[in-house]
């Protein structure tokens, strides 16, 4: 069995051009713009930044727990190469549960 170098392994999580908006009485406003990240098996991701820069909204979008007024306006979230945003709730639970140790 050969072990692939770390850099050549496919990402477990890949986020591309993620935009998150919050809808309000006066229209929508962006809370996250053009977020890109990639995480491979065995890696740890830390998101740091100033208060209000979108850390929590990014994490909530990856967990499908955005508040009702918020939405992913554009971009892609891939888990094991599958479009996480296109999955229904049941499919997303199965997909993420299959990764548990």
Image: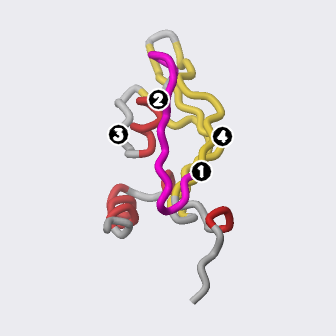
Q: Nearer the viewer, mark 3 or mark 1?
A: 1
Q: CA distance from mark 4 to mark 2?
A: 15 Å
Q: Which residue is mark 3?
A: 65
- With 18 as the anchor, is 8 left or right in this view? right
Q: Which residue is mark 2?
A: 55
Residue 83 can be seen, yes or no: no
Identify the disc placed on residue 17.
Answer: 4
Place residue 3 in its image quadrant: bottom right
* Picture quarter with the C terminus: bottom left
Q: Nearer the viewer, mark 2 or mark 3?
A: 2
Q: Is 78 contained in the magenta span?
A: no
The answer to whether mark 4 and mark 1 are in CB contact below 8 A is no
Instruction: Tell me the crowding category of disc 2: few under 14, some 14 to 19, or many 20 or more residues within 10 angstroms, Cα based.
Output: some
Q: Secondary structure at mark 4?
A: strand
Mark toward the start of the polypeptide (4 vs 3): 4
The answer to whether mark 2 and mark 3 are in CB contact below 8 A is no
Colouring scheme, one of rainbow, by chain, secondary structure, one colour? secondary structure
Residue at image x 58%, y 60%? Answer: 11
Q: Position of residue 9 (x, y in %)?
A: 62, 68
């Amino acid at each position: 069995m050969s072990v692939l170098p770390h850099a050549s392994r496919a990402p477990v999580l890949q986020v591309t051009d993620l935009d998150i908006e919050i809808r309000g009485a006066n229209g929508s406003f962006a809370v996250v713009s053009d977020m890109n990240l990639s995480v491979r098996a065995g890696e740890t991701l830390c998101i740091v930044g100033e208060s209000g820069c979108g850390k929590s909204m990014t994490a909530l979008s990856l967990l499908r727990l955005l508040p009702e007024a918020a939405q992913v306006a554009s971009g892609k979230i891939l888990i094991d190469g599958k479009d996480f945003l296109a999955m229904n709730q049941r499919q997303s639970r199965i997909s993420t549960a299959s990764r548990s140790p």
